[in-house]
Amino acid sequence: MKETALIIPEFCLVLLVGPSGAGKSIFAQRHFRDTEVISSDNCRGLVCDDEGNQTVTEDAFNLLHTIVEKRLKNRRLTVVDATNLLAKGRAGLLRIAKEYHTQVVAIIFNLDIDVCLKRNNLRPNRQVKPNVVREHIRTLKSCRKQIKKEGIRQLFTLNSPEEIEAIKINRRSLSCNKREETGPFDIIGDIHGCADELEQLLEKLGYKIKRNKDRAYTITPPMNRRAIFVGDLMDRGPRTPDVLRIVKSMVEAGTALCVKGNHEIKLVRVLDGKDVTLTHGLDKSLDQFATETSEFRHEMRDFMDGLVSHYVLDGGKLVVAHAGLCEDMQGRSSGAVRAFCAYGDTTGEKDNLGLPIRRDWAKLYKGSAKVVYGHVPNDTLEWVNGTLCIDTACVFGGNLTALRYPEMELIDVPAAKIYCAPAH
Ligand SMILES: [Mn+2]
């Protein structure tokens, strides 16, 4: 049989799901490191010296959950080798995965009863009764649909010993993981449609700008340098389409990275026809988009939608996210991580000006990675516990600022005018 690759994230929780005798342990041994596999049988053995003892189930699973928790906390891929057939049992593991912002992958061993019984008979000392195996298989048939609804990101079903034999596991990097990229970088704050200031700043940083006949840009960075944009490219300012042209061309040429801001999220929703209130300068962007082609709008929509929430760079020494990111979310992917990156640590409440109330995560930050972000317009630039907000309110008449990394040098250009009156 031809080899089949299962592609799973480098960091995830893998649940092996299937009856006793399905070959889960052999599979785990073949494809994962010993320390990556946490088996319920092994945990039974650890708590009472007898891997087949079913009376210590509660203690064994408490231990299993504790080990899974510690591993996910340390961002280690973890495989749970247990039957995982009951929703109640899976729920505890899914809760831990959610707490540590870990994607869950399920590999289902959907084998014939005869295969399982035969294999079960070969197990030394810890055979499971045939009627228990039969019950497992009945439960599996009914739980497959249920598993899909539990928020498991990837589900693979293996239907025969031959299929299992042909599997190869490939691990892919999470899209936020760019640890191997060491820079040097020029990290640029919230632009909000201020293309004049962006062009000036890029030139000041040594980038060569060429405008082509079709209004597209070719930007050539100085030797080895790359730009990183913190998001919020659009809204409020006068030239949003050009800012998008510049950033998209650089990202596609590999001369820049860009993370997703809350304004990108909202503009994509508008372009998708969703019902969105046109506040915070969104109306300006739509006016500017109206004179562009529909092809341009589609291209930019896909570009913005495809941006990643944050990047972990330079061996983990640098994190870039639009609204910042606390330590225990860095290098992870979940709805909560994406929300923090785009909106910050919001309480869900608003102040008397209608602005969201934010917790001051930077004040509490103890991580070793430097975190560079934008989102909150500031008059001054100040490192707080290794974090720096570089949104210096260009569109409100402030500056557009870049941080040169690793030099930690700040370069800025002043706004040509006040494009928008600040809300505070
Ligand atoms: Mn923002």
Image (cartoon, rainbow, N blue to C red):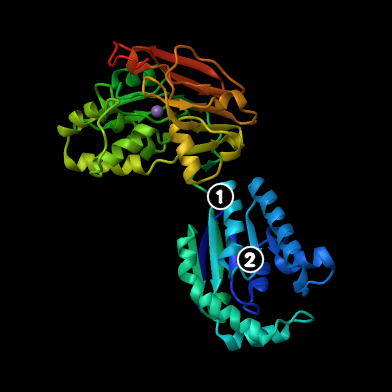
Viewed as shown, does residue 308 lie left or right of 80? left
| 43 shown above or below 414 | below
Q: Nearer the viewer, residue 214 or 128?
A: 128
Q: Work out which residue is located at the far left of the displayed protein and give it.
A: 291
Is the CB of mark 2 within 8 Å of ligand 1?
A: no
Residue at 55 percent of width and 36 percent of height = 313
- Which quadrant of the picture is home to ligand 1? top left
Can you tell which quarter of the image residue 127 is in?
A: bottom right
Distance from the alpha carbon under mark 2 to that under mark 1: 24 Å
**Quarter of the image with the C terminus in it:** top left
| Residue 341 makes an appearance in the image | yes
Numbered circle sitting on residue 98: 1
Viewed as shown, does residue 152 lie left or right of 273? right
| 408 shown above or below 246 | above
Secondary structure of residue under mark 2: helix
Secondary structure of residue under mark 1: helix
Instruction: Please name the amino acid that badge 2 sits on.
Output: His
Residue at 38 percent of width and 37 percent of height = 251
Q: Nearer the viewer, residue 83 or 375?
A: 83
Mark 2 = which residue?
A: 31
Viewed as shown, does residue 213 lie left or right of 15? left
